[in-house]
Each structure stands twice: as structure tokens, then as C-alpha cells.
Amino acid sequence: MRHRTETIRVWRLFVVCCLLAFSLEAVAELRSLPVPAEDGSLAPTWTALADGRAVLSWLERIDSGHAFRFAILDDDGFGPVGEVARGEDWFANWADMPGLFELANGAWLAHWLVKSGPATYAYDVVMAVSTDQGETWSGPFSPHDDGTPTEHGFVSYFHQAPESAGVIWLDGRETGGGGHDAHTDGHHHHGAGSMTLRAAVVDSAGEISAPALLDERVCDCCQTAAAVTDQGPVVIYRGRSAEEIRDIWIVRRIEDQWSEPTRIHDDGWRIEACPVNGPALIARQQKLVAAWFTLADGVPRVELVRSMDSGASFSHLATLGQEQALGRVDLAWWQAGFVVSWLDQVGGEALLRLAHFDEAGELRWERELAELDPGRIAGFPRLVSLNGSRLLVAWTEPGSLGPRVRVAELKKP
């Protein structure tokens, strides 16, 4: 009897493994999509529209500088290419990307980066508004008015009232002379003060209000992330202590008041340079999921946490890419759960990986999506989920005629 029971147990385990393998293959099917971006395109970002479509936006090199372009994706593929703006004096960067955001009233808010002085990292955030889904655009304006030739960038957005959006950015007005601390890419700059984290509200007429200083000392060149819970907006970013500990911090706005910054997770990563590797964040009602890269204790990895109380507290979900992660994370809700993407470095290649977690925060599967260039050319791969079923990823690949944006869809079984 014991032998028969053991045989049945082994057979059931075999069947479960076979079903799981089949499920993984079905879930993991990738389909490459034709993209209207040309050679010389880089820095792709996604915007999910309220009507179920998505906007892919990117920078593209032109003879006299760069153009900020976009195309709308629907069930039939990408539509015609539109253009937000173009210029000869832009700051075009692999990590500090332009972007689009749809307001609740249907207007679009776009931003890009324009040089403000001779220093390498002296540039401003410049914005424009469209009320006809990119057919026409307002004149340019900026969410900050300090007028200093210093770094302003790494923008994120959150929903406000129907006619406005919250805008978050890193602001170097206190650094002086366009300078800040050392980047891990080898650039060293010395300023008088620290990089700050600031916010403002921008409406569909381009009017700026409610400027706020959220943190007076933050890491200099890591992306910010913002979302809205039932209790209000939440912003996460890489902080910077006086001891050069650069863990991930959070500020929340509750009843129109921004909270004091608090640390999400005690990594204890001490680094006297900016890792250029910011966090990702998604929110739904009171639930938040955050992901980020750390090299604390000399071990590269991606950490994943969840909050069930709008960011008041967090619990640890998983550690991914242990001992081989490059980071560059993103998150998206998908299939009654969520997915997280990141880069691992294996040998001389960067592997774009994806993990799917269910609603309870349990890992369902993990897989490799693509091999990418391990350098800066791959940029930060970006995810977007449409109607909870379509999942799309965009990244940049090198080529003989320059970099080019690529897009693939992960097909739902």
C-alpha cells in the first residue's frame, strides 16, 4: 500500500510539473511588433490611455538635433508617427527619458530635456500640453522657475483632479554650476549643495501651482516613480543620507500635506556615487508594489516589496536576480497580479527577465525575454499592460546605423 501511495504521489507531481511547463510556455510566448521608430531612436516610454490603447514615445536623432516622437498602438498595430517637438540643444540621455502622461480629462502632458548651460548636466525640464491627442501642442513651459544652469530631470507623474497632474522631478538648484556628485559612469561633478526632490501641479492649460520641496537631499540621477492610492499620491526615489546610504525612500500626500520622507527597506547600500538605477512603483486602491536594484553588501539584486495600507508600511515579497542583477526595473499590473522586469548580466550579455506574481504576491513564473547589450545603449526597458491582458515591453537595441527602439508583446494564453 505504501508503494502504491508513493507511486501515485510521484505521478501527481509529474503531471503538475508537466502542466506547469506547458503553462510557462504558453504564457511566455513573445511576438515582435513592427515599430515606426527609425534608426537613431532611443529612450522609449509607454503611456496607457483610458480608452485601452497605448502610446509609445521616443527620442529620434535628426540632422539638426533630436525630435520627440510618438505613435498610438491599438489592436491593429501602431498608427502614424506624431511629433511633440524638436530641437538642437536637447539633453538626450539613455537614463533620463522624455515622457507623456494622460490627464483624467483626456489632455496629454509631455516633457523633454533642454540644455540650460555649458556644464554636461545643466538642463531643464520643458513641457507642453495637447488637448487633441497629439495633433497640436501648446508652447513650451517649465514646471520649475529657479533659472539655475543645473540639473532638472527624472520626471514622474501622478493623477490629480480631472484637469491636472502632479509632476515630480529631481532639482539641482542647490548644487550650483550644474554640478553634483559622482556618477558611476565616470563623470565627476562638485557642487555646493545637494540634489533635491520637488513637486508641482500642472493643469491642461499649462498653469503651474502648488510647488513643494519633498526631500532636500536625494541621489542625483536615479529615476523617480509616482502613483496614486485611495489615500493619495505616493512618490518613491533613491535617497542619500549624510553617510552616503542610498536606499529607497517614500513620501506620501495625505489630506493635501506631504509627509516626511521615510525609508521603505533597510538595504544599507553605501555608495559614494549615483548608480543611475531608480525604482518602479504601481498602485491599485490601497495596494502598492515597489521594485528596485541594490548592491548592498556587495551582492547585486532586485528587491520587491508590497504595501496593503497605501504605503504606510511594507512587507518583503521577493529577491530577484541574486548576484547577477543589473537592475533597470519596471512594473505593471497583469492577469490578476503583476509583473516585474529587470536586467541580469550573465557572461558578456544582459538578459531581460520577467517574473509574474499572483494577487497574493506568490511567484507564478519567471523567464528570460531577450538578450540585450549590457551597456547604456539598452537603456531602461519599459512595460505597459492594456486591459489586464496585453503586456508590451519596449527597449533599445544597437545597430550599424545607430540605436533603434524595439517592441514585443507577451501573449496571454
Image: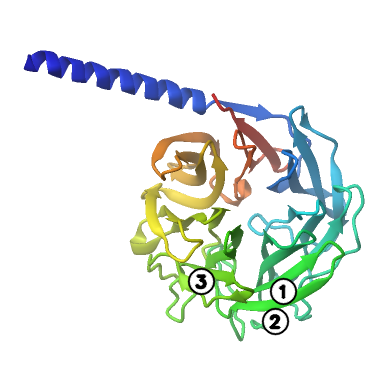
Task: Choose between 89 and 52: the one closer to the eye.
Answer: 52
Q: Is residue 377 visible?
A: yes
Q: Which of the two discs, 3 and 1, sits closer to the camera?
A: 3
Label 2 to label 1: alpha-carbon separation: 7 Å
- Can you identify the residue that label 2 sits on? 177
Callout 3–callout 2 Cβ contact below 8 Å: no
Give the residue displayed 67% in from the left and 83% down from the top.
176
Earlier-in-chain disc, 3 versus 1 = 1
Q: Check residue 239 in the rendering and tell me which mark sits there, or answer none.
A: 3
Q: Helix, strand, or loop for circle 3?
A: loop
Helix or strand or loop: what does disc 2 sit on? Answer: loop
Quarter of the image with the C terminus is top right
Q: Amino acid at mark 3?
A: Gly
Q: With respect to residue 278, does 212 lie above or below?
A: below
Residue 386 at x, y = what percent? 65, 38
Amino acid under label 2? Gly
Mark nearest the camera among 3 and 2 is: 3
Q: Position of residue 271 (x, y in %)?
A: 44, 70
Coloration mode: rainbow
Compared to 88, does 194 lie above or below?
below
Q: Which residue is mark 1?
A: 119
As measured in the structure, the alpha-carbon distance from the residue carrying label 3 to the one carrying label 2 is 22 Å
214 sits to left or right of 293 = right
- Residue 218 relative to residue 363: left or right: right
